[in-house]
Image (spheres, rainbow, N blue to C red):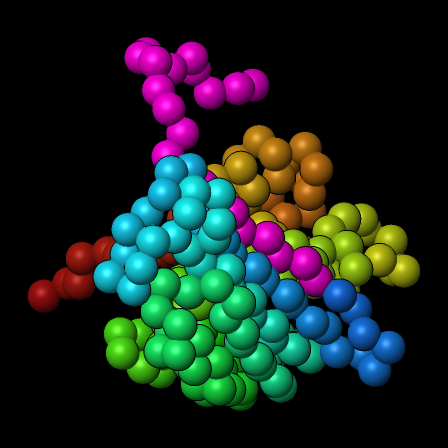
Amino acid sequence: MSLSNPVSRRALRHTRAIDIQAFAREDGLWDLDAHITDIKENDTLLASGLRPGGQPLHDLSLRITVDRQLTIVDAEAVSDAVPYAGYCDIIGPAYKALIGLNLMRGFRHELKARLAGIAGCTHLTELAQILPTAAVQAFANDVWPTYDAATAAQPKEKPFQLDKCHALRTDGGAVAEFYPRWVAKAANTAQVRTTETAVPSTPQDH
């Protein structure tokens, strides 16, 4: 399915591209290499001078290294194209502040606390915000199983992706079809059990 046809003629003016690649390392760690570019179609007059059309305004890279629990053990950032050379491109070392954070435990809150505003680069910090979901996709079916079955050789814990999006809600049809062991029955079962065991109170004689 594609987007609907534009309702008016239009001309491309700006392209932002984001690319994230995940690498399993021989030492058991994982690298997430993230890259963002902003490119104008036309010449752009900046305070720092003219940037010809087709040349990136931003060309920024961020790498974080995580363990199998998604805790960041190393981080680095580089800026190859920026609007204000000599100023924008000196912020890279600040992203060492990500070390020690866990992508699945309050990461975006801590990211904002440490690197928002003048403490970091707007675009690198924005790029970092999408790393948790990229890491989940990287780990899926490689570090974490995405299937489910009742056999002893396969996982007994609830698959990590359930109740993380509308399609995989445990009271929905997709879970009933593909993950039947994890259909949300607990609430209904508890309600029935409570109803069955309740004893009606009787008036006391006076």
- Image quadrant holding the C terminus, namely bottom left
Q: Give percent across and percent down for residue 118.
A: 27, 78
Residue 191 seen in this snapshot? no
Q: Answer above or below: position of 39 versus 84.
A: above
Q: Is residue 136 left or right of residue 53?
A: right
Q: What's the magenta region? A: 1-22
User: Which image quadrant for residue 8?
Assistant: top left
Please, which residue is most extreme toward the right here? 153
- Image quadrant holding the N terminus, namely top right
Q: Is residue 112 left or right of residue 72?
A: left
Q: Give percent across and percent down for residue 84.
A: 35, 69
Residue depicted at 57% across the width and 80% down the height: 76
Q: Answer above or below: position of 10 versus 128.
A: above
Q: Answer above or below: position of 155 versus 24.
A: above
Q: Answer above or below: position of 161 versus 156.
A: above
Residue depicted at 40% across the width and 29% down the height: 12
Residue 24 or residue 19, whichever sits in front: 19
Residue 96 seen in this snapshot? yes
Q: How many marks?
A: 0
Residue 18 among magenta residues: yes
Residue 194 or residue 66, whichever sits in front: 66
Q: Is residue 189 left or right of residue 140?
A: left
Q: Is residue 196 left or right of residue 183?
A: left
User: Which image quadrant for residue 143?
Assistant: bottom right
Residue 193 or residue 155, whichever sits in front: 155
Residue depicted at 81% across the width and 74% down the height: 25
Q: Give percent across and percent down for residue 112.
A: 33, 74
Residue 23 or residue 122, whichever sits in front: 122
Q: Give percent across and percent down for residue 176.
A: 63, 36
